[in-house]
Image: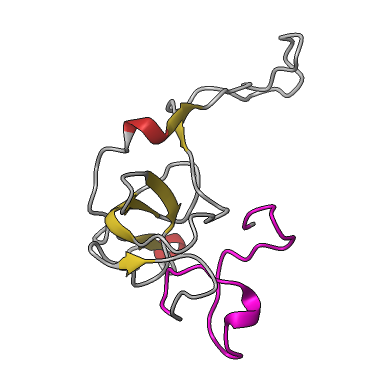
Amino acid sequence: MGIRTVKPTSPSRRYLTYVTYEEITKTEPEKGLLVPKRRTNGRNAHGRITVRHRGGGAKRMLRQVDFRRDKLGIPARVAGIEYDPNRSAHLALLHYRDGEKRYIIATHGLKVGDVLMSGPQADIVPGNALPIRNIPVGTLVHNVELQPGRGAQ
């Protein structure tokens, strides 16, 4: 993720930075992996306003992200890097060899065309998912599953 600094034209803009979107390769999300996001706008289950001044904004669709990475031993090709309005991380769209498509949290340096794998036999490559006992000490990790079977958090 590239970061662009702003020219300090005023004291408030002196340390202002923006995230650049040069690594985003897809503009439209995968339709089969979208679900509507239910918005409460400060209302409780009875429909009464319980938190004031909430509401408005743009409608958003939730992307179904694969936090479990349970397709063991099946290689997947990165088809695109996408923006997600619901989180600060970008998403990578994976096309598995058996035809299934899934989103994962994109690692730093992931590019379209990279081949990823999950499972204990996977190589130590950014984007691969494997048990923590198979990862050497000093390797950078992200998206760690804290309890077995619960998915990464």
Give the image quarter of residue 128.
bottom left
Q: Main secondary structure of the magenta part?
A: loop
The structure residue drawn at horizontal position 69% and vertical position 52%, both measured from the top left corner, is 150
The structure residue drawn at horizontal position 49% and vertical position 75%, both measured from the top left corner, is 121
Which residue is the extreme one toward the bottom?
137
**How was the colour assigned to the protein in this rendering?**
secondary structure
Of 117 and 140, nearer the camera is 117
Relative height, residue 44 to residue 122 (above, below) = above
Give the image quarter of residue 123.
bottom left
Of 41 and 26, nearer the camera is 26
The stretch in magenta equals 125-152
Rendered location of residue 66, percent (x, y)? 51, 49
Q: Is residue 78 left or right of residue 33?
A: left
Q: Is residue 10 magenta?
A: no
Rendered location of residue 118, percent (x, y)? 48, 65
Q: Is residue 129 magenta?
A: yes
Q: Is residue 153 left or right of residue 58?
A: right
Count all numbered tags in the image, as a single digit: 0
Q: Is residue 111 left or right of residue 42?
A: left
Rendered location of residue 3, percent (x, y)? 35, 68
Relative height, residue 145 to residue 123 (above, below) = above
Rendered location of residue 68, percent (x, y)? 57, 53
Of 54 and 36, nearer the camera is 36
Which quadrant is home to the C terminus? bottom right
Question: Do we see residue 2 in this rendering?
Answer: no
Relative height, residue 96 to residue 132 (above, below) = above
Which quadrant is home to the N terminus? bottom left
Question: Do we see residue 56 in this rendering?
Answer: yes
The structure residue drawn at horizontal position 57% and vertical position 82%, both measured from the top left corner, is 135
